[in-house]
Amino acid sequence: MGVSAAPFDVAQELGALYPFTPRRVEVGGHTLSYVDEGPRDAPALLMVHGNPTWSFYYRDLILGLRDRFRCVAVDHLGAGLSDKPQGYAYTLANHVANLGQVVEHAGLDHVTLVVHDWGGAIGMGWATAHPERVDRCVVFNTAAFRSTRIPPSINLCRVPLLGDLLIRGLNGFARAALIRAAKRPLPRAVKRGYLLPYRSWRDRVGHLRFVQDIPMHAGIPSWEAIGEIGDRLQLLRDKPFLICWGGEDFCFDDSFLDEWRARFPEAEVHRFAEAGHYVVEDAGAKILALMNGFFARTSLAQAGPRR
């Protein structure tokens, strides 16, 4: 598979915050990066991030679980250490297909799916196409179904030219998220880690394209795709679900949690009243304990490399 250099030296820049050696896979002529930590014959966790984060969002969960689980955390094209092609079609369907390439490249047969933000639609897009390979799901603030709700501040970023200026020019989307998405003040080093892959106009193309692709109506390319994913969620009704939800999320509010509850009434749900959209940042230690308990109570096929 094609390998390209990371945009910066991860070990030098982030040190103990992100002590992982990324792997690479070529997708459609572009290089996609992902973390693969833990024993290869251990149960696999497939972690899918959203916008404007990257696999860095899952760093503490990986560190806390990699002794007993194989933790695979993708960086979508346009995000993190992956390539950021300028003319790429950053659509939901393409992100789902790319995630499938990571799954195959890593040789994952069965996974626990872990999703947040856009990772919900992307991860569930892959999962509902391969329900036999999904053993259970862990859901953080996200959606994988149609909704017409959007915060005014995010909708403003969809305005032509203005969105380019705010997101690509000023890095406003990622910077604002560091203030609004976490209710617990983030350490300076953590803020730097989130922003590090997005240092220029070119680096932020994925941020803008994700915002432009939010499927609010039939005129947006991913409207049909998100509708199909939502319809197929029923294929996962027999899977154990753990939902950990930040109750102070300005984007995915409790109406989205209510929808998850309606679709998966047997899910184990924990709502953190004082946590925000970056619920793993605000309640990480509690979430890690809940995940360990959830894993102990549910079964998972031993997923190893394909022979």
Image: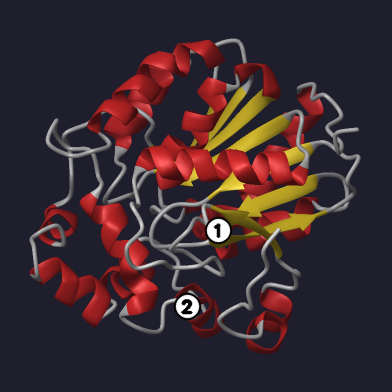
Give the image location of residue 61, x and y in percent: 68, 54
Sooner in the amino-acid sequence: mark 1 or mark 2:
1
Which residue is pictured at 39% across the width and 57% down the height? 51
Crowdedness of circle 1 by 10 Å Cα count: few (<14), some, many (20+)? Answer: many
Q: Within 10 angstroms of label 2, few (less than 14), some, or many (20 or more) residues?
A: some
Residue at coordinates 75% horizontally, 69% vertically from top-left?
20
304 w.r.t. 207: above or below: above
Residue 256, above or below 32: above
Q: Classify mark 2: helix, strand or loop.
A: helix
Q: Which kind of residue does numbered mark 2 sit on?
A: Lys
- Amino acid type assigned to the residue bearing label 1 in the image: Asp
Q: How far apart are labels 1 and 2 at the CA level?
A: 18 Å
Q: Is residue 169 left or right of residue 187?
A: left
Which residue is nearer to you in this view: 153 or 270?
153
- Looking at the image, residue 89 sits to the left or right of residue 32; the answer is left
Res 13 → quadrant: bottom right
**Residue at 27% across, 31% down:** 255
Answer whether residue 60 is visible to the viewer in this image.
yes
Q: Residue at image x 38%, y 31%? A: 144
Residue 272 seen from this side: no
- Residue 88 placed where, x, y %? 36, 58
Task: Report which residue position mark 2 lands on.
Answer: 191
Using the rendered view, name the quadrant where residue 304 is placed. Answer: top right
- Which circle, 1 or 2, is nearer the viewer? 1
Residue 247 % position (x, y): 37, 44
Quick one: which residue is furthest to the bottom in this view?
Answer: 12
Q: Nearer the viewer, residue 156 or 227?
A: 227
Q: Which residue is mark 1?
A: 75
